[in-house]
Image: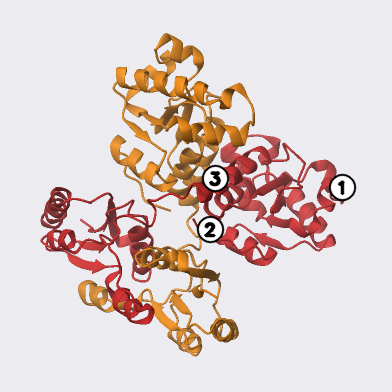
Chain colours: A orange, B red
Amino acid sequence: MRRIVFYVSDGTGITAATIGHSVLTQFDVREFDSMRLPFVDSPEKARAAAARIRHEGEQRKLRPIVVNTVVDPELTRLLADCGALMLDVFAPFIAPLEQELGVKRQSRVGHAHGMINFADYETRINATNYTLTHDDGVDLNYADADLILVGVSRSGKTPTCLYLALHFGVKAANYPLTPDDLDRQELPKTLVAHRQKLFALTIDPQRLQQVRESRKPGSQYATLAQCQKEVAAAEKLIRREHLPMLSTTHTSIEEIGSKVMQTLGIDRQLF
Amino acid sequence: MRRIVFYVSDGTGITAATIGHSVLTQFDVREFDSMRLPFVDSPEKARAAAARIRHEGEQRKLRPIVVNTVVDPELTRLLADCGALMLDVFAPFIAPLEQELGVKRQSRVGHAHGMINFADYETRINATNYTLTHDDGVDLNYADADLILVGVSRSGKTPTCLYLALHFGVKAANYPLTPDDLDRQELPKTLVAHRQKLFALTIDPQRLQQVRESRKPGSQYATLAQCQKEVAAAEKLIRREHLPMLSTTHTSIEEIGSKVMQTLGIDRQLF
């Protein structure tokens, strides 16, 4: 039996899971099971969560770890009655911030990912709609784009664009380099007009072959020879055009997104 | 001039921004500017970041706040030479975890949103592809769906599905209730066959009217009367079918996603 980590929150539990995962990767996260317990916002739910945690600890004969972002001290006290190692995410930062800011913290339940601001919401939704309608070269009018990712098919453009739109409200378009573009070794005019918005993604041909094979098994498109040929031609074109380029082979969506924004000088708040 | 908060990281800075934003919402985050400084992974970059932070503090005549997830103690020491209030996100949790786990933490730079596990990556990408091809009733074969969101057009189905796919690898489909469905007060057969996967989103008609108006200004579709009529008919149908239902009017994408998964009993790790 593996040790279990609970991410307990009065809201979604995203903050607790994010910090908990980050700190545990510094040990060895593969040795843990994990579970989110979101919306723990009443004494009843706190007692139920504590019972659940205690039960898992007894079953596993290994003390659970609780990463806790519940703000209400009374609920945290009820939770603590579970025998786990309690890590309170906010506690260490409240006193230094109260001293620096000269104000007391207010206990707002589940505020971080609860919603609230229509303007922010609309920014995210409009960017997501933009990305969906400017995906894969469907609409080539890039006047409103914040950025345009270019690369061969399945190099990671679409998920990166959706991530940037959803979480940063960035209008991210993408354009798949066509065989015709690669043969001519020229970017289409519609892209050249927005050169300062372009960022190129590339990928290791072996990896590309795997991705395409799982998408279209047995196709010409998924052969290693085809992948090698397209990637070589794309990288040649990208270098010739002096576009910023990143390999997605060993890079997470979040990391690609951050590097693209940093390179193009786009500074947006994370939603 | 407002006080500035820096989210400084050797990786993407997402963990720093998430925790920093969460803790500052407990004070009053609207009084702050913020900036992420990602990929601070060398002494040169740490010195440059410190200079940048110091400069902002002098300009604003207000001490900056630094929320820091840089793991390397030497880089953190260089960063601390910036005059800001330093909040080290990981520091408070290392000692208790080392004691509980009986192992020392290893300083892995930018691990949390960096490293990629091909299997995890493929889960996210496959789910995202699934969601894109099962968006808005385009493909009605729901055999592989983990869940299906139903609701009137613009009730928040698509962004929620994309969020669940990208961050939890959930194959989230969505089906827009058509005028025909609403008139008949019946769900299409293709949905009824997957009743246990269904979750309904609703929305305040006034809010829906705003969203539709910004999408298709002046259309019949965006009139308040049309929105009221559709929402009333949809809620009647949803209640008649006993589907779980949530209003998206005051709810963030993250919160909708968490509640849908919790209600349907889908437990997935956050990527």
Answer few, some or many: residues within 10 Å of disc 1's Cα (few below 14, many 20 plus, some between 14 and 19).
few
Q: Which residue is mark 1?
A: B189
Foreground residue among B103 and B90: B103
Under circle 3, the secondary element is helix
* x then y, percent, for residue B172: 65, 50
Q: Is residue B260 left or right of residue B49?
A: right
Q: Residue at x 75, y 48 (%)?
A: B230
Question: Which sits in the foreground, A173 or B118?
Answer: B118
Mark 3 belongs to chain: B
Q: Is residue A138 left or right of residue A24?
A: right
| Image: B182 above or below A154 | below
Camera-side residue: A202 or B128? Answer: A202
Q: Is residue A63 above or below residue A233?
A: below
Residue depicted at 55% across the width and 81% down the height: A60
Label 1 or label 3, whichever lies nearer to me, is 3
Residue at image coords 37%, 23% = A235
Host chain of mark 2 = B
Question: Residue B254 bears which disc, if any?
Answer: 2
Q: Between disc 1 and disc 3, whose residue precedes?
A: 3
Query: Which residue has dot 3 on it?
Result: B122
Q: Earlier in the sequence, mark 2 or mark 3?
A: 3
Q: Earlier in the sequence, mark 1 or mark 2?
A: 1
**Which residue in the rendered view is the most extreme toward the top?**
A184
Give amino acid for label 2.
Glu
Residue beneath the point at 55% across and 61% down: B255
The answer to whether tags 1 and 2 share a subunit is yes
Mark linked to residue A247: none
Q: Amino acid at mark 1?
A: Lys
- Discs 2 and 3 carry the same chain letter: yes
